[in-house]
């Protein structure tokens, strides 16, 4: 059976599965007007469908799973989804990205179910600036939840912040103070243009290379990248317990190290975050007898994966906003 590899020599041990498109935040770069459910849309993947999907990807070589949204913690059966993933022997790492609103109430349940890594979106350590970016004044509660998570034995707890010119791009000193004594990583993500954020992108886009130059000048050094790692280049400094990751999608050769595939909450395979086609897998998730056909279908699609996205040309593919596929 063919494994998860493409014609450019890249392998894909990492799957990002969106559990739903809904989100309870109103971040300016993603859903400034909040989430509005469309009528007549297909229902979300069921637990049996998710299990068949994960077992197929695992059989093909997927070893790391990340649960995304929208906001995945809004799914009422999230603990069951995590436990299901943990029951697939080949899956070694189960991560999730969340806005952190439910951390304090539910993080222990997620950990007990088998979650091994956690990313929490925190776009600013300044309460007023955080509220301005996200539309919610919940920073204190989220950071308290992060502290709870740090004591639960996760393999990794990381924070995500989208770099935004004029909103948080001057706040590196505050982040350095935060990282000095905490064994945690903050990942700065360069703002990406999507189908419906062009005006926001033009106002607030700042190149990640500027931050990288600033870090290197201050003695931070890039670290080796694990085979199943995400797209961040991670930096460490001997004076800090924490680390800093930089995700620079507009950097040269960014896609050369791509190792991840995506499946939407409705069951479409996306070969690229900014791809122009979605391959419907749901018809093959209805019973166990279709396992081999499902595996063959997934493998065959890798033959049409492009060498790189076309963001530099303003081509954003099928993505209207990042909540639609989980970033």
Image (cartoon, rainbow, N blue to C red):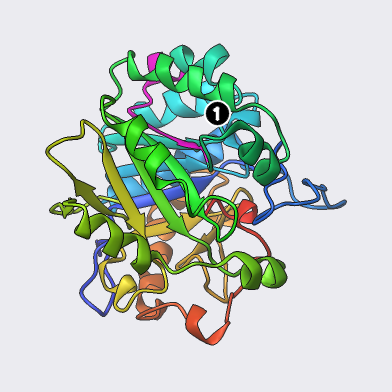
Disc 1 on helix, strand or loop? Answer: loop
Q: Residue at x 31, y 43 (%)?
A: 64
Between residue 18 and residue 206, name the one nearer to us: 206
Q: Position of residue 143 (x, y in %)?
A: 50, 23
The residue tagged 1 is 100
| Left or right of 49 in this view: 175 | left
Decide: is 210 above or below 282: below
| Left or right of 222 in this view: 296 | right
Label 1 packing within 10 angstroms: few (<14), some (14-19), many (20+): many
Whether residue 88 can be seen here:
no
Q: Residue at x 48, y 83 (%)?
A: 312
**Location of residue 236 (image quadrant):** top left
Q: Residue at x 26, y 50 (%)?
A: 229
Residue at the extreme right of the image, as rendered: 39
Q: Residue at x 43, y 65 (%)?
A: 297
| Left or right of 215 in this view: 262 | right
Q: Position of residue 268 (x, y in %)?
A: 57, 59
User: Where does the magenta region start and end?
Assistant: 110-122
Q: Position of residue 101 (x, y in %)?
A: 61, 25
**Location of residue 189 (image quadrant):** bottom left
């Amino acid at each position: 059976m063919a494994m998860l590899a493409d014609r450019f020599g890249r392998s894909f041990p990492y799957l990002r599965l969106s559990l739903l498109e809904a989100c309870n935040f109103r971040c300016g770069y993603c859903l400034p007007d909040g989430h509005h459910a469309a009528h007549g849309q297909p229902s979300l993947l069921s637990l049996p469908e998710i299990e068949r999907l994960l077992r197929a990807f695992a059989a093909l070589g997927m070893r790391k799973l990340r649960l995304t949204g929208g906001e995945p913690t809004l799914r009422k059966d999230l603990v069951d989804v995590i436990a299901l993933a943990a029951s697939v022997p080949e899956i070694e790492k189960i991560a999730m990205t969340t806005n952190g609103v439910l951390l304090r109430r539910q993080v222990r349940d997620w950990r007990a179910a088998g979650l091994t890594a956690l990313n929490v979106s925190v776009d600013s350590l300044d309460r007023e600036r955080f509220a301005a970016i996200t539309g919610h004044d919940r920073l204190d509660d989220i950071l308290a939840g992060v502290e709870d998570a740090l004591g639960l034995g996760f393999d990794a707890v990381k924070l995500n912040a989208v770099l935004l010119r004029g909103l948080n791009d001057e706040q590196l000193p505050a982040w350095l103070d935060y990282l000095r004594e905490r064994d945690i990583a903050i990942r700065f993500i360069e703002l990406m243009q999507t189908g419906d954020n062009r005006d926001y992108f033009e106002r607030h886009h700042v190149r990640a290379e500027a931050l990288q130059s600033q870090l290197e000048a201050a003695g931070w050094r890039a670290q080796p990248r694990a085979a199943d790692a995400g797209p961040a280049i991670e930096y460490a400094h001997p004076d800090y317990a924490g680390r800093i990751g930089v995700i620079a999608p507009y950097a040269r050769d960014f896609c050369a190290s791509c190792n991840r595939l995506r499946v939407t909450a409705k069951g479409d395979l996306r070969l690229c975050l900014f791809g122009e086609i979605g391959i419907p897998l749901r018809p093959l998730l209805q019973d166990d007898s279709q396992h081999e056909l499902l595996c063959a279908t997934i493998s065959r699609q890798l033959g049409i994966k492009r060498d790189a996205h076309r963001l530099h040309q303003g081509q954003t593919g099928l993505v209207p906003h990042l909540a639609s596929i989980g970033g």
